[in-house]
Amino acid sequence: MSTTLNEIPDIVAALQAGRAVDAERLCRDSLQRFPGDTDTLLLLALALGAQGRQEEAVAVHARLTELLPDSPLHWGNYATMLREAGRLDEAAVACDTALRLAPDDAAQWVNRGMLQLEQKNFEDARDALLRAVELDPRSPETIVRAARACAICRDYRAEELIRPWREWLPLEDDLQLELADLHQSLGDGRTAQILLEDLCARSPRNVPAAVLLAGVYERVNDLDAAQSLQESLLRHPGALSAANLQDLTHLRATMATRRGDATLARGILEQAGPRNPGDYAHYFDLAGVCDRLNDNAAAMRALDMAHRLQVDELRQTVPHRFEPGAPILPAAVGRVSAEDYLKWPQLLAPAGVESPVFIVGFPRSGTTLLEQMLDAHPSLQSMDERPFFNVLANRLDDDGISVPRDLHRLDQHACDELRKDYLQLVCTKIARRWDTQLVDKNPLNMLWLPLIHRIFPRAKFILALRHPCDVLISNYMQNYKASVLAAACASLPQLAAAYVTAMECWLHHVEVFKPDLLVSRYEELVADPEAHAHRIAEFLGVRDPSPMLRFDQHARDKGYIATPSYTQVIQPVNRKGLDRWKRYQGEFSAVLPVLVPMLRHWGYAGEPGA
């Protein structure tokens, strides 16, 4: 027996209007007359869930699975409500049942993935949500969920998934907020800004969106807008949740640091404390202000906590990085010997001026400074660093070609296609100005020299070099998103090993391929920027290097810079970063012996006994 036709619309209308109590009353009245009606039972469960009465909703969903045991919809709803009630083991059983009944139902794979995220089975969750995208490739919600899981697993596919975001607008408020937050976490502050400004314009009372937008304004170096929005939000503290207040408090600390008041920033951070038990970002921020105040011991205590918490997370999100024998830098494992190189077929390739200029070097060696100098020149165009060669290598691996071992197998057609793929990736990130030469700055592209040389054999390279100890202490203070760098920075000895590994890989392949190379020492650049700019211009064959010296204004005009040094490259060249490591010299006792080969090779002081 079924409810009368006019009762269901009334219940649905009450739910849509947010009147869950009225919807519940209507459902119970109807069920007095038709106690087994499944449509009404489903609406009752929804009404109870909307009131936060999860356990009662669970009981109703359980009843629906008894009445309709072959319905994947009801098993899926039951699994969702069990998950929201925190009964994860029971939710897993219900979810498995739904998938057994409907193995090609995208909604059930989304359910599985969301449950696995709750269970902290991150890689399984990613795979389940990617399966959902395969089954329902047009659903923005499904795609955003999958991209979020990829981002948690530090998987490069996150960016590819959300590339068509403009086609999805407008989205429901919650989904657009999640998409903006995802873009921000992936280093695309400009897109986050667009999404949040649109969302705040149409939903001006959306406090979480406004709070996130204030943080985005700081990240894109629009400090006035960040300050104004922050003050506006704090004038109405009753509208802010505890999480909102914590986020704004940490933003206040960041703004104080940006204004040069490290003492105030430290006080704010120490009073606020971490936002949650795993908030390693808080400790990285605290370490930064303690370092500015020359409280080296406090900085190291904060860094020890930051890295411990970050590694705890990484062990869950990217467990393969911590398996026994896992390479510290996977891209540095393979080597092309001189004998191997002789087997490579000679192919047609672009000339040097038609190829990108590659800025490489271990992170925190001054690569961003060099990039901004070159980008300031009208004949050059850079882009925020992107792992394009990781992406290309993964695509080759999918085709059974391992990099660098199988590069000799690439023929003219394959290399031409790789150049097209590379250019397509570039054009997804910048509006290419075709009258300029592209500058590709990604420090660890130094590990991809064999692949780059195969595609662009006449390209010019600039190696950014800096005292290895300064490089290490600067890296140790960074909150990296990329899992390979975050894992490498887990400790100073681990970081030293990563540095030497990267340099040995680079030096080996430089000897094999002999690329057109300029070594740019950070110490020489800051000592005489004008002479260094002339040297770079001569190497690249560009006229009038004077625009390079105005890079700081150019960087301020750009606003968003997707590297940890975004606050530094909008300032003129200074010597603040020189010999910073000496303040932490006591921490380097176990590190210097590891660095000796590179200290000697590059002629830097600092080795034991020196």
Image: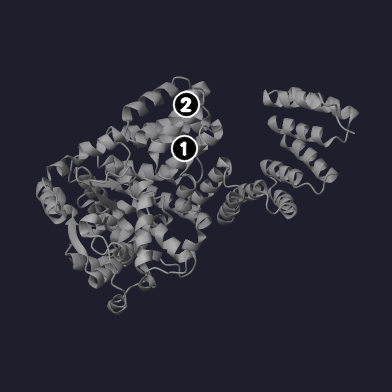
From the image, tell me which residue sits under label 1.
Answer: 166
Q: Quadrant of residue 551?
A: top left
Q: Quadrant of the C terminus?
A: bottom left
Q: CA distance from mark 1 to mark 2?
A: 17 Å
Tell me where residue 576 appears, x and y as whole percent.
Answer: 20, 45
Give the vertical position of 473 relative to 164 (above or below).
Answer: below
Residue 125 at least partly seen: yes
Q: Which residue is mark 2?
A: 200
Q: Residue at x 55, y 56 (%)?
A: 123
Q: Amino acid at mark 1?
A: Arg
Q: Earlier in the sequence, mark 1 or mark 2?
A: 1
Give x and y (percent) for residue 23: 75, 25
Task: Note whether residue 329 is visible.
Answer: no
> Is disc 2 placed on a helix, strand or loop?
helix
Q: Residues within 10 Å of mark 2 (few under 14, many from 20)?
A: some
On the picture, is 328 further left or further right than 242?
Answer: left
Return the mark for residue 228. none
Residue 38 or residue 459, whichever sits in front: 459
Residue 458 in the image: x percent, y percent?
23, 63
Check the image and name the residue furthest to the top. 235
Picture quadrant where residue 600 is located: bottom left
Residue flagged by tag 2: what amino acid is it?
A: Cys
Q: Is residue 92 above or below residue 322?
A: above
Residue in the image at 87% along x and 36% along y: 36
Give the foreground label among 1 and 2: 1
Q: Residues within 10 Å of mark 1 (few under 14, many from 20)?
A: few
